[in-house]
Image (cartoon, helix red, strand yellow):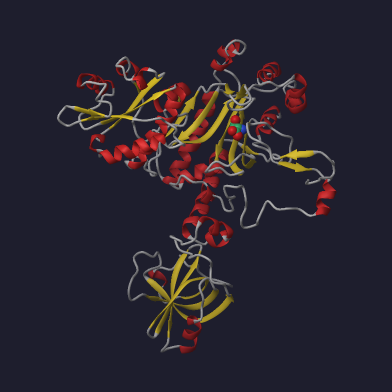
Amino acid sequence: MYRTVNNGELRKSHIGKEVIMCGWVQKSRDLGGMTFVDLRDRYGVTQLVFNMDTNAHLCQSARGLGREYVIQIKGKVIQRTSINKDMQTGDVEVEVGEIIILNKSKTPPFTIEDETDGGDELRMKYRYLDIRRNPIKNNMLLRARVSSETRKYLDAQGFCEVETPYLIKSTPEGARDFIVPSRMNIEQFYALPQSPQTFKQLLMVGGIDKYYQIVKCFRDEDLRADRQPEFTQIDCEMAFVEQEDILNMFEGLTQHLLKEIKNIEVSSFPRMTYDDAMKTYGSDKPDIRFDMKFIEMNDVCQKNNFIVFDSAELVVGINIKNGASFTRKQLDTLIDFVKKPQVGAKGLVYCKCNEDGTFKSSVDKFFSQEDLKKWANKCNSSSGDLILIMAGETNQTRKALSTLRLHVAEELGLRDPDVFAPLWVLDFPLLEWDQETKRFHAMHHPFTSPKPNDIKKLDHDPASVRANAYDLVINGNEIGGGSIRIHDKDLQSTMFKHLGFSESEAKDQFGFLMDAFEYGAPPHGGVAFGFDRLCAIMGGQEGIRDFIAFPKNNAGRDVMLDAPSKINQEQLDELGLQTK
Ligand code: ASP
């Protein structure tokens, strides 16, 4: 037997027991006649002790142990003289009687500690060492729990887990496909699924009325900061449901996960329309852990000969409680912040509501105390508050103020990772105008149904058509999104037409779905959660990378495998491919 106990297990009650243990040498210290070794495995760390007086030979071999050597020991659990309260096993240590080196190790390229000295690329190159570190290991354990709790909940609700293929035909969901050449069908290609969207709809036609899958999806996008080319979804679909059924079911899943994983009970989630979210938070994924709602101020700001406001489509502000104490320097930093390219604003106007009832603004030249008082009334500001205002074209200004809102909240410590504020955002627009291609795209995907009352607007005012589409948002992150689908062949054809597909293009790409719709497709709808991000949020972090065992870097590379890489001429020939 390799081991009788693991390294996180021993307590006072084990004192006197003989044990066999295995693990990695975390560190070894010589203190006079004694050598101490911290032995680590997935479960924890146990202190081993070797005594020069009682067993000099063994103590000598302990001194030769390098970091990350894999060893097996036999020994006796004894009371520790100096108890270590910070260690689970800190009451005891193991007096070693025998040691076997199972494998030596080179010195690792970074320290295997909670706070490591390894940079990101190095950690990724030696990810197997990185996973030995508690923060990464704990993320993997958390991820496994989130997936097992997800399965528990959905299984109990009668969902059936079905696997769908990875080698498929392109499903356009807004991103570029990863393409796989077919050797057996020269000059033909599979695509990797951007999601199992069409398959889950076909499963509904197939009568599997509650489907789920924890599944890999692939999108060949330019990788924005925290995206991965392959990522995981909790993908679900249900038949004979309305939007309300889906919202309730997946609110239930989210509540279950928060309760089981974080021991947090969240009552029913607020709901907000897309329009309200944009108007009140400047974002379709608002962080509602804190207030700072947008206040539209055109009426109190315009017609004062301040051209920036007068020429603006929208003048909009936020009130920062107790923000009047911001120093000049802090305010200047905020102004610099909004001018950065990623925010892209021309400037920022502030107004301090002083404790003595007076006001101090950055535009005092244009606005009297009376005017500023109107601002304060409009914003419901109390003395001691700070009003920040931006102005310009509506969408751009909202976006910029939203970024500022999050930034200020971050600075003020209002984005507490232990607080969870989920909400549903509803009634998304069906279509979105793409400036580059000069045509409408499906905002969610082409299978999303328009709101029945809006269908008649598809022809003359497509931009105003709302969809039966919804997103689950937690703490400013889009965690999930879905929709009620079109299940009628004619409506689906109309949709393809509006998206600029000719009849033959639609038939070529989606003929299989349209055919299926002719054989009794039930009304259906679904949702998919971004599993990596859900795990990151549950783990109190913004980045998804350390919640994925073997992630890619920002250039889409696996630096450990050194992939993607060239393939040899023989493989190219077999596939009928030329690289140049
Ligand atoms: N397939 C969609 C997505 O990946 C989710 C859904 O509509 O269920 O975003």
Residue 42, x across and y down, in percent: 51, 62
- Nearer-the-camera pick, 421 or 519: 421
Residue in view at x 74 percent, y 25 percent: 516
Number of numbered discs: 0
- Nearer-the-camera pick, 514 or 344: 344
Q: Name the quadrant containing residue 361.
A: top left
Instruction: In the displayed orientation, state which residue is furthest to the left.
Output: 356
Residue 105, placed above or below residue 176: below
Residue 304, x across and y down, in percent: 29, 16
Asked whether residue 362 is in view, the answer is yes
Residue 428, x across and y down, in percent: 52, 23
Q: Quadrant of the C terminus?
A: top right
Asked whether residue 271 is in view, the answer is no
Residue 316, placed above or below residue 326: above
Residue in view at x 42 percent, y 87 percent: 52
Residue 41, x across and y down, in percent: 51, 66
- Nearer-the-camera pick, 517 or 184: 184
Residue 239, placed above or below residue 14: above
Splitting the image into four quadrants, where does ligand 1 fall? top right
- Nearer-the-camera pick, 3 or 365: 365
Q: Quadrant of the N terminus?
A: bottom right
Q: In the image, is 323 to the left or to the right of 569? A: left
Q: Name the quadrant containing residue 490.
A: top right
Q: Name the quadrant containing residue 216.
A: top right
Residue 492, placed above or below residue 156: above
